Image: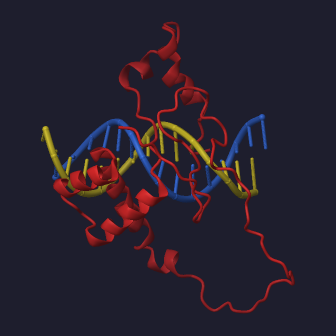
Chain colours: A red, B blue, C yellow
DNA sequence: GTTATGCAAATACGA
DNA sequence: CTCGTATTTGCATAA
């Protein structure tokens, strides 16, 4: 409903790449250049970035360059990462009353009786692509987005 | 199999 | 031209 067009856009982007396909796509393809592939940042890198973020939510270009070099990432990527981190915070902090805390009391419960418990145990195999990105070049590692809490696969490229 | 939803990167725009 | 923010876009997962 909102962001749904995984396929529709796909052809638009890659359609003309392979073939001229002059009969269709022209307006959209003409204006927008190809986007970069989504760079997946490794979990460890994210952690490092996070730490720096706490120290300096707004590092200067020099710091970013330094950090980027240390982590072996592109300067742009690091810059963007910080930007997104700030946005995320903004989205979570302001709505104090509505987003942060709405659970308090609630201690009852017990849940069920299940004696075992290992419900949240997913046996995934993130080590490899869950579903190929659509068969085509693999610049980086697409991979698992984030199941919602920890657990992220891991990898990132080491190119360069 | 589809659609819907969320998060996160990349892009576009403005300062 | 660089930097910051807003918006779009991409992909992974849930329903």
Q: Is residue A105 left or right of residue A56?
A: right
Pinpoint residue A10: horizontal percent, then vertical percent: 55, 28
Q: Give the percent coordinates (x, y) of residue A151.
A: 60, 61
Camera-nearest residue between A23 and A136: A136
Residue beneath the point at 77% across and 70% down? A119
Residue B8, position in %: x, y?
A: 47, 54
Q: Name the foreground residue: A69 vs A39.
A: A69
- Residue B8 left/right relative to A111: left
Task: Using the rendered view, name the quadrant where residue C1 is placed.
Answer: top left
Residue at 80% x, 76% y is A117
Seen in the picture, residue C15 relative to A34 is either above or below; the reply is below
Query: Is residue A119 shown above or below A19?
Result: below
User: For residue A116, what is the image quadrant?
Assistant: bottom right
Position of the N terminus of chain A, as image quadrant, is top right
The quadrant the C terminus of chain A occupies is top left
Q: Picture coordinates of residue A5 (x, y %)?
A: 59, 35
Q: Residue at x 31, y 66 (%)?
A: A52
Left or right of A42 in this view: A125: right
Residue A156 shown left or right of residue A103 in the figure: left
Q: What residue appears at the point 47 percent right and 46 percent down from the top-left corner?
A: A156
Q: Nearer the viewer, residue A95 or A107?
A: A107
């Amino acid at each position: 409903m909102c962001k749904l067009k995984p396929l529709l856009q796909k052809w638009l982007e890659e359609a003309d790449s392979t073939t001229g396909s002059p009969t269709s796509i022209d307006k959209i393809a003409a204006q927008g250049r190809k986007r970069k592939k989504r760079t997946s940042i490794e979990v460890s890198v994210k952690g490092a970035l996070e730490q720096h973020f706490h120290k300096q939510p707004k590092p200067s270009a020099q710091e970013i360059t330094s950090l980027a070099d240390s982590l072996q990432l592109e300067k742009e990527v690091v810059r963007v990462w910080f930007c997104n981190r700030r946005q995320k915070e903004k989205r979570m902090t302001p709505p104090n009353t509505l987003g942060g805390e709405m659970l308090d009391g609630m201690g009852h419960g017990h849940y069920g009786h299940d004696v075992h418990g290992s419900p949240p145990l997913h046996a995934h195999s993130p080590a490899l692509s869950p579903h190929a990105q659509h068969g085509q070049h693999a610049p980086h590692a697409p991979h698992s987005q984030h199941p919602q809490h920890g657990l992220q696969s891991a990898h990132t490229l080491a190119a360069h």
